[in-house]
Image (spheres, helix red, strand yellow):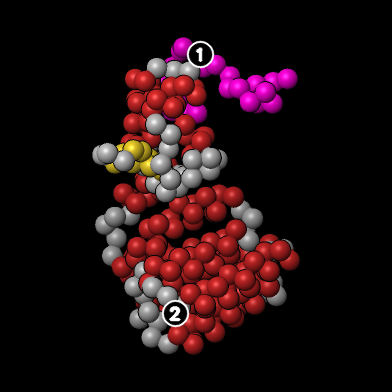
Amino acid sequence: MNHEQSGTREPMRRVGLIDQAAARFREEVVSGRWPVGERIPTEAALVAEFGVGRNTVREALQSLVHAGLLRREQGRGTFVISSSELTGTLERQLAGGSRRHYLELRLALDSTAASLAAASRTDADVAQLRDLRDRREAAWSHDPDARARADLDLHRAIVEATHNPLYVTLYSSMLDVFAVHMRDDESGDEDAAHRRHHELVEAIAEGDADRAAVSVAAIMDPFLR
């Protein structure tokens, strides 16, 4: 019986112990065992679970704070704020962009994703896209955060339908950046916006890459104007 089967953890080697601890903790975040938005176990609990000293735990956690995965809150504990180190890096690198810059970037990414998804989507992808499209429309009577999240959920699913893991990683890492800049977007014509998203999903379902890209451009055009 190996360590995983027995429920015990393999002891860490002393060489590079902080790096090893940081790698273990990073895996907890990336795997989702420490979910985004949740508080991680206390330092004392981590000392007991991983069999390393408190200073090692503290320094390893601090390295993940610097990487943008965790955030310490005085009196509350340490929380997971991202499952990707790329998110924090992108947020810093893209911090100086104007609203139009973000819209142009999203147009480029979403157009390409829609074309690729039209060529690579599965029946399961199509079913999910239609469901998320309907959820997006239903969310439009709620607050701006709910609308932005429902919109991004649909567009992220389109990226996932490309079945390109690099594209998915990049786009997922940018969702928080997009959410901030798209939260208050209003197209001025809700019915037209819903119709364009319906056309986008159906173009992908029918495997029409050109029409899918054109649909994305139609969705973004009112904002860019």
Between 179 and 144, the residue placed more toward the observer is 144
What x and y, as percent, mark residue 200?
58, 76
Name the residue beneath numbered marker 1: 13
Of the image marks 2 and 1, the number of the one nearer the N terminus: 1
Give the number of the mark in front: 2 or 1. Answer: 2
Residue in the picture at 34% in, 65% down: 181
Please say whether residue 155 is one of the residues in the magenta stretch.
no
Which class describes the residues within 10 Å of circle 1: few (<14), some (14-19), or many (20+)? few
Q: Which residues are magenta?
A: 1-24
Q: Is residue 201 left or right of residue 144?
A: right
What x and y, as percent, mark residue 175?
44, 58
What x and y, as percent, mark residue 34?
49, 40
Q: Is residue 71 left or right of residue 204?
A: left
Image quarter (top left, top right, bottom left or bottom right) of the C terminus = bottom left
Residue in the picture at 45% in, 78% down: 140
Please say whether residue 15 is one of the residues in the magenta stretch.
yes
What x and y, as percent, mark residue 32?
53, 43
- The answer, for residue 213, to whether it is visible in the render is no
- For the residue marked with disc 2, what is the amino acid? Ser
Q: Secondary structure at mark 2?
A: loop
The quarter holding residue 31 reads: top right
Between 7 and 178, the residue placed more toward the observer is 7
- For the residue marked with disc 1, what is the amino acid? Arg
Residue in the picture at 39% in, 46% down: 81
- The answer, for residue 193, to whether it is visible in the render is yes
Between 158 and 133, the residue placed more toward the observer is 133
Name the residue beneath numbered marker 2: 141
Residue in the picture at 51% in, 36% down: 28
Relative to 25, is 215 above or below? below
Say if mark 2 contacts mark 1, CB within 8 Å.
Answer: no
**Cα–Cα gap, marks 2 and 1:** 55 Å
